[in-house]
Image: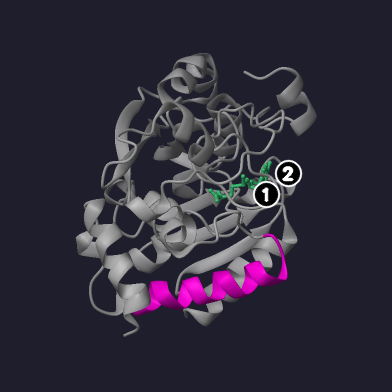
Amino acid sequence: MDSTFSEPFRRIFRLNGLDRLAVGPAVARFRHLTVLLTEANARFNLTAIRDLPGIIARHYADSLLAEPLFPRRARVLDIGCGGGFPCLPLALARPDLRITALDSTQKKLDFVQHAAEALELKHFRTICARAESRTLRELYEEFDVVTGRAVARLNILAELAMPFLRTGGLLIAYKGAQGSEELAEAAHALQVLGGGEAQDLPMRLVLPPECQTAPPAKVPAAAQGGGAKAPATGEGRAATAENSAAQEGTEAPGAAEATESRHILVIPKERPTPPQYPRAYAAILKQPL
Ligand code: SAM
């Protein structure tokens, strides 16, 4: 195995307590994904994070911080998966999961589909659509877990996500340093949409010395409102963790390793979501719950 990949991969996973996922064929499979990602990035702007340690830490390790929360064989919907995060690392680390990757951008989903085929991922499919599109109605209540990383603030993400969850299912939202504030802001939305008592799990993403420079910031889109805090891909990138946490949450600059603040928000669905949700996106933005 090429040590230019396996050494940083094992080291960064170990730093993040993910050693258990950096064993055996997993290393070669993540290396394969990295080759595919790098090739795609040479053709179009799939992800702003292009350096190897950055990809391993900010995409792979970050996507897997929540891995133990996914029940065995869960049916998972990843809303706004972009270039495949967190869904592709989850699929590699947890072949038991049955993953549907959803995004409204065809080009990104073409990459995710290509990667899934090249990596021979079983139980993995892609759907190109807007999450609020009524054409997806047949998928309502079909999932055990819905995830979203760097898609929208929680009150908006919840309106997109909750209809897809079965009662008893979990919305797992990947958030950055502002996660607790987003959770407080979304209290009304979660109550209206059928959510139960949320768990706010604070985490630290550990960055090795060679990836402590924050990627370039981009102006947040209105819907993302600076609340989508996880590292994100491509042109839709909001005020993401790599930017915001670099400003607010990164600690120990100059030390051997730095850490960035993350919040994994886990919201159980307790009641059916009222049928008027999700509304059209313009209405969601105009009057967020
Ligand atoms: N989750 C990925 C990550 O963390 O790298 C991508 C994040 S990117 C900033 C946000 C993605 O959400 C974009 O690919 C965009 O196309 C998608 N998106 C935003 N709103 C959406 C919606 N209503 N339905 C489907 N996809 C949406």
Residue type, numbered disc 2:
Ser
Where 187 falls versus 261 (above or below)?
above
Q: Which residues are magenta?
A: 28-45
Residue type, numbered disc 1:
Leu
Question: Majority secondary structure of the magenta segment?
Answer: helix
Dot 1: few (<14), some (14–19), or many (≥20) neighbours within 10 Å? Answer: few
**Between 238 and 121, the one nearer to me in the picture:** 238
Q: Position of residue 137 (x, y in %)?
A: 66, 46
The Cα atoms of the two marked residues, 1 and 2, are separated by: 6 Å
Q: Does 249 sit left or right of 247 as displayed? A: left
The local secondary structure at tag 1 comes to helix
Q: Position of residue 244 (x, y in %)?
A: 51, 32
Q: Position of residue 185 (x, y in %)?
A: 51, 15
- What residue sits right under mark 1 in the picture? 136
Judge whether residue 207 is colored magenta. Answer: no
Where 117 falls versus 63 (above or below)?
below
- CB of mark 1 within 8 Å of CB of mark 2? yes
- What residue sits right under mark 2 in the picture? 133
Q: Position of residue 152 (x, y in %)?
A: 60, 34
Dot 2: few (<14), some (14–19), or many (≥20) neighbours within 10 Å? Answer: few
Q: Is the residue marked 2 within 8 Å of ligand 1, measured from its CB?
A: yes
Q: Does 27 sit left or right of 42 as displayed? A: left
Look at the image and tell me whether residue 280 can be seen.
no
**Quarter holding the C terminus?**
top right
**Residue found at the very far bottom of the displayed protein:** 1
Residue at the image point whose x is 34% and y is 51% from the top: 209
Residue at the image point whose x is 25% and y is 62% from the top: 11
Where 274 falls versus 23 (above or below)?
above
